[in-house]
Amino acid sequence: EIVMTQSPATLSVSPGERATLSCRASQSVGSNLAWYQQKPGQAPRLLIYGASTRATGIPASFSGSGSGTEFTLTISSLQSEDFAVYYCQQYSVWPLTFGGGTKVEIK
Amino acid sequence: QITLKESGPTLVKPTQTLTLTCTFSGFSLTTSGVAVGWIRQPPGKALEWLTLIYWDDDERYSPSLKSRLTITKDTSKNQVVLTMTNMDPVDTATYYCAHRGTMRLNVFDIWGQGTLVTVSS
């Protein structure tokens, strides 16, 4: 099973600043990496797939990069609605696995 | 518009079998490439993928839970059913069903609202 490790666990950022979240895979997943956003009491929302392709309706302020074992989600200028927990997911091999999440909180 | 909604018991006793139903609209599980999965999330913890069923009846399971899980589909009712046997308090979680992305990758682009299942005697 591929283990997905996200860092940091919590990221404190001021509104308007950039946030950079990391996701590392225990073995190469190519570009088969997705990112989700989850707000309290809500289901996750797909942000990015293919490591860098934004899902439908996702603003350009969200961008993904990386391949192999190292991936990054960047939020260029944090808005109030962006404070949430973010998860990465690999879909290269079975079983599908998620990272432990990064909570982006207001500084 | 694609929607999914989970239904089932909110409380089950240890050793009992959990049955959850995902009722969906806006797509058909007879269409090539379509799939529905189940993912769970214990309170305050991360997401855990459980199982996935494809339009062609292919099924995939988490190896750690495979012996306890069964996923089935009823295309006439637009439903997917998850069965989990021998429930334990550690299985307390919000259970989500989700639509496999239209890009035909094993990511989930539309999720149900989730249903919290508590396992307690």
Image (cartoon, rainbow, N blue to C red):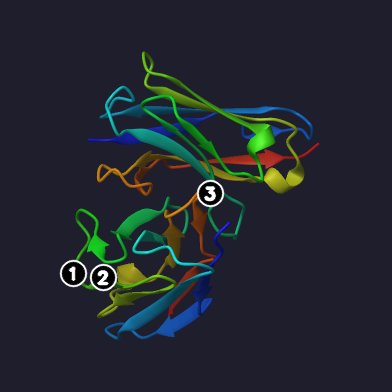
Kindly state the secondary structure of the residue where label 3 is placed.
loop
Callout 1: residue from which chain?
A: A
Q: Amino acid at mark 2?
A: Phe
Which mark, residue A60? 1
Secondary element type, mark 1: loop
Residue in the image at 25% along x and 80% along y: A77
Most foreground residue, B47 or A81? B47
The chain to which mark 3 is attached is A
Q: Nearer the viewer, residue B25 or B49?
A: B49
Check contact, mark 1 vs mark 2: CB within 8 A: yes
Q: Is residue A15 left or right of residue B71?
A: left
Name which residue type carries label 3.
Pro
Q: Circle 2 marks a residue in which chain?
A: A
Identity of the residue drawn at 43% across and 42% down: B113
Question: Can you give x and y, in whole percent of width and height, for residue B115 in the image?
Answer: 53, 39
**Residue drawn 23% across the image and 62% down it:** A53
Q: Are there few (<14), some (14-19), or many (20+) residues within 10 Å of tag 1?
A: few
Asked whether, in this view, residue B92 is left or right of residue A43, the answer is right
| Disc nearer the start of the sequence (2/3) | 2
Q: Which residue is identified by label 3?
A: A95
Q: Which residue is mark 2?
A: A62
| Foreground tag (2 vs 3) | 3
Q: Quadrant of residue A19?
A: bottom left
Q: Are marks 1 and 3 on the same chain?
A: yes
Residue type highlighted by circle 1: Ala
Q: Position of residue A49 (x, y in %)?
A: 31, 58
Between disc 1 and disc 3, the foreground one is 3
Residue B89 in the image: x percent, y percent?
Answer: 75, 44
Residue nearest the observer in this picture, B117 or A23: A23
Q: Describe residue A57's horizontal placement relative to residue A11 as left or right.
A: left
Q: Quadrant of residue B23?
A: top left
